[in-house]
Image (tube, rainbow, N blue to C red):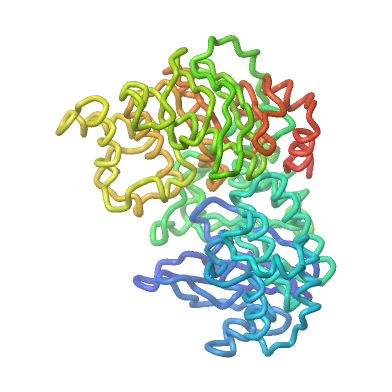
Amino acid sequence: MNTADSGAVVEVSGLRVEVARGGSEIIDGISFSAARGEVVGLVGESGSGKTTAAVALLGHARRGTRIVAGSVRIAGTSILDLAGDELRRVRGRIVAYVPQDPAAALNPALRVGLQLEEMVAAHGGLVTRDRIAGTLAEVALPTDGAFLRRYPHQLSGGQQQRVCLAMAFLLRPAAIVLDEPTTGLDVTTQAHVLETVRELCEIHETAAVYVSHDLAAVAAIASRVVVLYAGRVVEAGPTQALFNRPGHPYTRKLASAIPDVAERRRLEAIPGRVPAPGSRGSGCVFAARCDFVLPACVDSPPAAVELQPGHVVRCIRVAEVDRGVAATALPPRPEPMAAPLLEVRSIDAFHGAQHVLHHVSLALGRGECLALVGESGSGKTTLARVIAGLHTARTGDVLLDDRPLEPGARERPIEACRRLQYVFQSPHNALNPRRPIGAIVCAPLRHFHGLRGRAADERAGELLERVALSPELLGRYPSELSGGERQRVAIARALAAEPDVLVCDEITSALDASVQAAIVDLLEHLRERDGVSLLFVTHNLALVRTIADRVAVLERGTLVEYGSTTHVLDGPVADYTKRLLADTPSLSATI
């Protein structure tokens, strides 16, 4: 599918990237373009090839892969024809990159100012100190010496990302690649970063390629969107047209998996998974997961169909299928009536001398979901860790069934630890990479229930099935699983204890829309079937609308709003809550 424009700053045509061993395609036939000052979004599930296509704009292929065909031209320069020093000179000067994780991208041993100066020195020292100060001001960062002398760890996540934006725009490149730059950021910081990117692209006439699984964020910033699936472009077009009336069944399903802060809706996960390189067949790559598949779809790849100027889709049934977004509105949740199972009374918490929670009190009923929301630094995770016994520098009481719990988990009775389980934000860090999945899930079975041997293995297999995973995964290691599968394993491990309360700390923040929908559906089943109570820590207010019965809003460690989801989101009282809602991107509002 050729969506490139001969008058564009960025022109990608026929791009193919393969696995180095075996030659299986990761992406194939990728073509798109971006004009001066334009933001183009690349969207799709994990494994769709978004990042592979994006980093190819810098002439880069990740380890174990190689670029074998196609062309990438940026401001007239053929990037794929360059190598060595020539390629290094164009990176940053002609095309720049903003990474997903700024903490990993910035050198922790160097001060911020020195890293900016090194960027300038690497390209011949063509930029003055005034340019550095001006660029920092453009991304809303301080320009004084005290800030420049800070190390990356002394900055917030939003500040680190803004430093990366400053480095990317410092040399005024013709194009910039942004790889999931707002993943993990709270809604306010995300809104500011998106606005900053939009303004800088307009001011400096820079073309941008914005990679994301967050369709609402893409809709808020991009003028055109390219939808990738299994390494192919399945649809591309203007943002409003593509999201209002998607032509491809895959795009339609992606849009149906997105929560919306404006209304409570059923999130539709896409059954199955993206086929791996080497197993994609010769026909439509989405055929195995499509509701409208015909034998002809499997036999040969579909030709591109232009629905309107600039809106192109690859689907042989595009004229027959419903092109509306299949979002099912749900009624508001009823007012919660459950008696308190878990209570927090007058909690004050401290990080050293810093007072981070101020007299916080709340309650969680049996089978209820209470969402804990706020910006980064508001104290959400600290409160969650206080409840779980992982943060002991606190005063006040945490009660389970009216019985006070000790501050530290090690001092609590084993039964209390069994009943209250914690699911961490990052499944990559929460699962031991040196132990197979079976051993990970069996650990709480042995610790809390005394199960060993075959009995434990059988129970572990049942737990994996309960979270919609195959028992065949018991012998695999975490590195062999996708992010969504790892998060399900983390939930299965927590469920092995047969808990009454699950503390879920930002567990969907790094997951794509379809996997997030599947995790939400799983949590709903746990509540309805087993009466498990959820403390759901998140910065995603759109997701809160879907999953939570009540909401507690924290601002700098103080509880500023607390009530039913409908009352808080539809009639907020606190100015802080109103600001969070205003900063939350909404797919329906944007398009």
Q: Residue furthest right?
A: 203
Could you tell me which residue is drawn at 49 percent across and 43 percent down? 425
* Residue 169 location (% of width, % of height): 73, 72
Residue 572 image-quadrant placement:
top right
* Residue 107 location (% of width, % of height): 54, 70
Residue in front for this viewpoint, 144 or 283:
144
Q: Is residue 522 visible?
A: no
Residue 152 image-quadrant placement:
bottom right
Residue in front for this viewpoint, 493 or 84:
493
Residue 35 image-quadrant placement:
bottom right
- Report the side of 529 relative to 93 (left or right): left
Could you tell me which residue is drawn at 73 percent across and 27 percent down? 569
Q: Image quadrant for the C terminus?
A: top right
Residue in front for this viewpoint, 43 or 186:
186
* Residue 226 location (% of width, % of height): 66, 58
Q: How many marks?
A: 0
- Report the side of 3 relative to 284 (left or right): right
Q: Residue furthest left?
A: 453
Query: Is 57 situated above or below 473?
Result: below
Query: Is 375 situated above or below 90?
Result: above
Could you tell me which residue is drawn at 62 percent across and 86 percent down? 89
* Residue 240 location (% of width, % of height): 78, 49
